[in-house]
Image (cartoon, coloured by chain):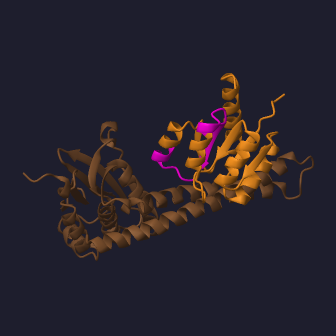
Amino acid sequence: MTQFKQTEIAFFGRITAGVTHELKNVLAIVNESSGLMQDLMALSKETPAYHDRFQKALTSIKGQVQRGHNLIAKLNQFAHAPDTTVRTVELFETVGLVVALSQRFAALKNVTLNIVSPLPSEQAVQATLNLVQFQMALFTAIECWLSMAAPGNELNIYLSKKENTCAILLACEGAFPAGNDLTSGLAATEKWPLLQDIATTLGGTLEIDAQKSGILLMVPAKHPMNVPAE
Amino acid sequence: MMAKINILLVDDEAEYITTLVERLQLRNLHSQYALDGLQALQMVAAFTPDVMVLDLKMPGIDGMEVLRRVKKEYPRVEVIILTGHGAQKDEDEARRLGAFEYLKKPVDIDELTQHIQKAYQYKISMGY
């Protein structure tokens, strides 16, 4: 990634992170104001007209505020990705964030995304990599897979690490093209060439696992630039 | 009967903080508020609260600096951080500086009330 592109992405991230902070404050005010309304209703000696409807609406506001906070927290975390070019991250957490942010795209196709929870020892797998590129690779892989998915499909994402390589397998549950159909279908998707480019930039590889109807993305657990030359 | 706790709330979002004052009042906790770090430090100097509920991101003197100065000059004031910005490094730093608790917005009002009371009880138990 060129220095200018990196600067552009960092700029975008900083502005987004700033806005998420403001949005958190907005939600905090909505939360306290609706809470105050609930307090006052609880104190009222007489049952106000439309009490149940007010209560239902206030409960709904509270739920939506929490939903908003969760989304904003994820967006804020995402916006901080370009703060440093290469960094050490918890792989499970990073994949979880990308999957959470991709859920809406999957929902539009009536598809479910799941992370298959690795063993506790594997949940702590760390990788030192370009976080923006890695997130983009994973999201692009999900996009490629979604472009071939049918309503009702489930995409299971498996993580593992062997020696110095992190493997992320995106595998389908349910009826999905297999064998040559899968290979040619994925290769024909609009984003496949981009995914190949990012995988290469990450110093990794990209394979189609025809048996599991999936995409296998393998990246070095340490960014190639951080590995001392032999 | 609950002892009267002197509470200072500090947050630059006026609407947020005034609503919080009102909700705490409904729970028999009377508080004052400051809208920035400088005002907070002036108020601490004027009436030395028992418990301070402090936001981190504020214009001018930010919350972390307020915490640093308050714990240095008024160590008997117990400080609860209440912030929307939940970075782990901020929490670590706040605790290192002596924050009693680190809470993230949105916080349940009854939970906040309990933390304020716990902070006050701690202060009393330390003989302050």
Q: What is the count of numbered marks?
A: 0
Q: Is residue A158 visible?
A: yes
- Residue sitting at 34 percent across and 64 percent down? A139
Q: Nearer the viewer, residue A54 or B113?
A: B113
Q: Is residue B75 magenta?
A: yes
Q: Describe residue B7's horizontal placement relative to residue B59 as left or right.
A: right
- Residue sitting at 23 percent across and 58 percent down? A217
Looking at this view, name the residue that lies furthest to the left. Answer: A230
Q: Position of residue B116 (x, y in %)?
A: 69, 37
Provide the letter of the chain coloured orange.
B
Q: Describe residue B125's horizontal placement relative to residue A112 as left or right.
A: right
Quarter of the figure with the N terminus of chain B: top right
Q: Describe residue A206's horizontal placement relative to residue A102 as left or right.
A: left
- Residue A24, quarter of the rendered image: bottom right
Provide the letter of the chain coloured brown.
A
Q: Describe residue B8's horizontal placement relative to residue A11 as left or right.
A: right
Quarter of the figure with the C terminus of chain B: top right
Q: Nearer the viewer, residue A88 or A202?
A: A88
Q: Which residues are magenta?
A: B71-91
Q: Position of residue B54 (x, y in %)?
A: 64, 47
Looking at this view, name the residue that lies furthest to the right. Answer: A46
Q: Is residue A110 visible?
A: no
- Residue sitting at 31 percent across and 53 percent down? A87
Q: Nearer the viewer, residue A59 or B122?
A: B122
Q: Is residue B120 magenta?
A: no
Q: Position of residue B103 (x, y in %)?
A: 59, 44
